[in-house]
Image (cartoon, rainbow, N blue to C red):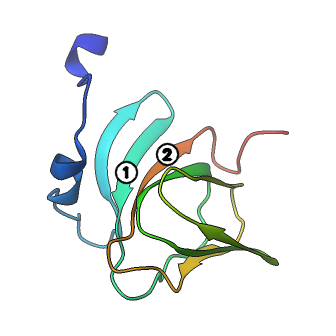
Amino acid sequence: MTDRIPALISRSAAATAPLPAGRLSALMLTHGSMELRWYAPSGQDPQTPHDRDEVYVVVSGTGWFVRGDERVAFGPGDVLFVAAGAAHRFEDFSPDFATWVIFYGPVGGESP
């Protein structure tokens, strides 16, 4: 039922959400297979490949995004895609870097 799902999740609420033990991002919303998280690493990005497809929507900051052999510059408003199981990370990012992360689909990723 959508009346239990908030219509708005603010950036300020996400930025102050606690990180669960053993997680690098704060869970902000789930609906079906979709999971919305807030990710704002400090200094370096220690993440490892995930078992589901994901989309990043950069909120603030700049830097480089590495996915496999690709390395691309990013900034606010940019969207980045990572297929399940692909190695990826953010590098040389500014101190204000923060992004929404949307995980979705089945374990192993969706078929193209």
Q: Which residue is mark 1?
A: 37
Determine which residue is flagged by label 2. Answer: 102
Corner quadrant of residue 7: top left
**Element assignment for label 2:** strand
Are the residues flagged by discs 1 and 2 in contact, CB closer than 8 Å?
A: yes
Tell me what residue is drawn at x 52 percent, y 63 percent.
75
In the image, which disc is placed on residue 47? none
Mark before the other along the chain sequence, 1 or 2: 1
Q: Where is residue 11 shown, x and y percent of the image?
A: 25, 48
Image location of residue 37, percent across then percent down: 37, 51
Query: In the image, 22: left or right of 110?
Result: left
Residue 1 can be seen, yes or no: no
What amino acid type is highlighted by mark number 2? Ile
Above or below: residue 6 compared with residue 66 = above
x%, y% of residue 61? 42, 68
Q: Is residue 26 above or below residue 11?
A: below
Tag 1: amino acid: Arg
Q: At which x and y percent is residue 85?
A: 70, 63
